[in-house]
C-alpha cells in the first residue's frame, strides 16, 4: 500500500517522468493542482486502486492499494468525502464500510466483467442447489451479491477465508480461475461459477514461456485471476499489492507482472533498478477514470454511490467478516 507524501508538482513530475511524456504532463499538471486543492477544501480523500494511471496513482491519490487494503482504508478514514478511483464494486465496498460518508466514483460506468457475471438471483439459485453450503464471494461482486454471501474475500486472502469457515465444502464465486487457484491450495471442496476477468483470461502459458525463453533471468509474477496454466508457468502468484511487494523485496533484475499493464508503470517508478517487460492488457473499466473526471466529480459532488438500506445491511456483514480475517 502506498500513501501519498505532500509532494509539489515538480516532485510529482520528477517521480513519474520515466513513464509520462512531457507533453502529457502539461495537460495533467493543472488538473493535479486543482484536485489536490479541492481535496483539502472539502476534506476529501482519494483512494486509488493499483491499476490507476501514474498521474492519478502518484499525483492525487492519498492511498493506492489492492482491493483488500482499499476496503480497510475506507473504514478508517476521517475525511467527509471518499473519491474511489477504481471500479464500481470498489466504490460500493467503500460505501458499505463507511455508510455515513459520501462516496463518489469519477465514472459510474466503470464496471468489471467478474462483477457483472453474477446476480443476487444466481446466488439464491446456487444456495437452493447446495443447501447449507456457505457462500464465499470475491469482492469483485455487486452489493446485491454480497448481500447473499456469508463472507467476502479478495485475491490476497481467498485461501485463508475459505479455510476460516471450518467446513468441507464452499460455494466460491464468481471467478472460475481464482476458484481453481484456491482449490489447488486447500482441501476444502470448491464449487465454482463461470465468471472470468476479461483482462487476465487473455494471458496464455505459451506467451509466458516465450518471454521466459527470451529472458532466462526474468521473474514472472501472476495475478490469481489468470488461467491455471499461466499461474503454473509463473514464479509467484498474488494480489496486486502482493505482486508489488514481491518486486520491492526481491529486486529482480527483470520482471514481468502478468496483470493489467498500467500497474507495471506504477511499480517501475518505485523500483528504478528493475527492468519491466510489459505485454500490455488494459482494463477498459479501470481506464475510464481520468483526472478530469476526478476533478468534475469532486467539484460537483456527483456520481454518489447509493445502496438500499436492506441490501447494505446484509452486504456489510460479509465484507466486515472478511476484514477480521486479514491477509
Ligand atoms: P486485487 O485485489 O489484487 O487488487 O485485484 C483486483 C482486481 O480487480 C484485479 O483485476
Ligand atoms: Fe474486473 Fe478484470 Fe478489470 Fe479487475 S482487471 S476490474 S477483475 S475486469
Image (cartoon, helix red, strand yellow):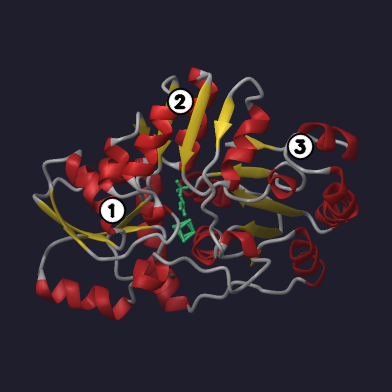
Image quadrant where residue 13 sits: top right
Of labels 2 and 1, the one closer to you? 2
Of labels 3 and 2, the one closer to you? 2
Density class for disc 3 (Cα within 10 Å; few <14, some 14-19, many ≥20) is many
Which of marks 1 and 3 precedes in the sequence? 3
Residue found 25% across the figure and 73% down from its top: 123
Residue 201: x and y, percent?
Answer: 37, 56
Residue 245: x and y, percent?
Answer: 50, 29
Q: Which residue is mark 1?
A: 177
Tag 3–tag 1 contact (CB < 8 Å): no
Image quarter of the N terminus: top right
Residue 163: x and y, percent?
Answer: 20, 43
Tag 2–tag 1 contact (CB < 8 Å): no
Q: Nearer the viewer, residue 120 or 236?
A: 236
Residue found 19% across the figure and 78% down from its top: 125
Residue 215: mark in rendering: 2
Q: Which residue is mark 3?
A: 16
| Inter-mark Cα distance, 2 to 1 | 27 Å
Which of marks 2 and 3 precedes in the sequence? 3
| Inter-mark Cα distance, 3 to 2 | 26 Å
Q: Is residue 211 above or below residue 119?
A: above
State whether residue 327 appears in this view: no
Q: Is residue 11 above or below residue 223?
A: above
Q: Nearer the viewer, residue 256 or 193?
A: 256
Residue found 89% across the figure and 35% down from its top: 10
Side (left or right) of 197 relative to 10: left
Numbered disc 3: secondary structure: helix
Amino acid at each position: 500500500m502506498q500513501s501519498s507524501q505532500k509532494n509539489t508538482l515538480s516532485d510529482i513530475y520528477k517521480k513519474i517522468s520515466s513513464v509520462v511524456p512531457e507533453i502529457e504532463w502539461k495537460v495533467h499538471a493543472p488538473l493535479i493542482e486543482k484536485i489536490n486543492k479541492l481535496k483539502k477544501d472539502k476534506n476529501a480523500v482519494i483512494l486509488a486502486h493499483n491499476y490507476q494511471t501514474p498521474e492519478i496513482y502518484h499525483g492525487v491519490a492519498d492511498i493506492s492499494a489492492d482491493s483488500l487494503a482499499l476496503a480497510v482504508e475506507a473504514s478508517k478514514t476521517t475525511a467527509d468525502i471518499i473519491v474511489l478511483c477504481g471500479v464500481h464494486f470498489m466504490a460500493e465496498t467503500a460505501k458499505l464500510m463507511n455508510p455515513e460518508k459520501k462516496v463518489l466514483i469519477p465514472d459510474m460506468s466503470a464496471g468489471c466483467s467478474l462483477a457483472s457475471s453474477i446476480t443476487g438471483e444466481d446466488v439464491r439459485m446456487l444456495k437452493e442447489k447446495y443447501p447449507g453450503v456457505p457462500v464465499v464471494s470475491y469482492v469483485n461482486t455487486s452489493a446485491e451479491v454480497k448481500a447473499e454471501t456469508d463472507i467476502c474475500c479478495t485475491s490476497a486472502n481467498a485461501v485463508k477465508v475459505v479455510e476460516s469457515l471450518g467446513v468441507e465444502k464452499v460455494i466460491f464465486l464468481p471467478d472460475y480461475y481464482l476458484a481453481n487457484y484456491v482449490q489447488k491450495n486447500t482441501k476444502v471442496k470448491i464449487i465454482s461459477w463461470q465468471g472470468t476477468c476479461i483482462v487476465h483470461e487473455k494471458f496464455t502459458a505459451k506467451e509466458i514461456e516465450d518471454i521466459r525463453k527470451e529472458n532466462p533471468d526474468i521473474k514472472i509474477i501472476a495475478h490469481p485471476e489468470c488461467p491455471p496454466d499461466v499461474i503454473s508457468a509463473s514464479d509467484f502468484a498474488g494480489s496486486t499489492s502482493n505482486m508489488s511487494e514481491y518486486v520491492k523485496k526481491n529486486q529482480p533484475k527483470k520482471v514481468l507482472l502478468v496483470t493489467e499493464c498500467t500497474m507495471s508503470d506504477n511499480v517501475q517508478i518505485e523500483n528504478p533498478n528493475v527492468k519491466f517487460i510489459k505485454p500490455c492488457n488494459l482494463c477498459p473499466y479501470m481506464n475510464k477514470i481520468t483526472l478530469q473526471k476526478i476533478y468534475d466529480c469532486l467539484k460537483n459532488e456527483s456520481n454518489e454511490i447509493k445502496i438500499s438500506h436492506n441490501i447494505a445491511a446484509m452486504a456489510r456483514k460479509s465484507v466486515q467478516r472478511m476484514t477480521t480475517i486479514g491477509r
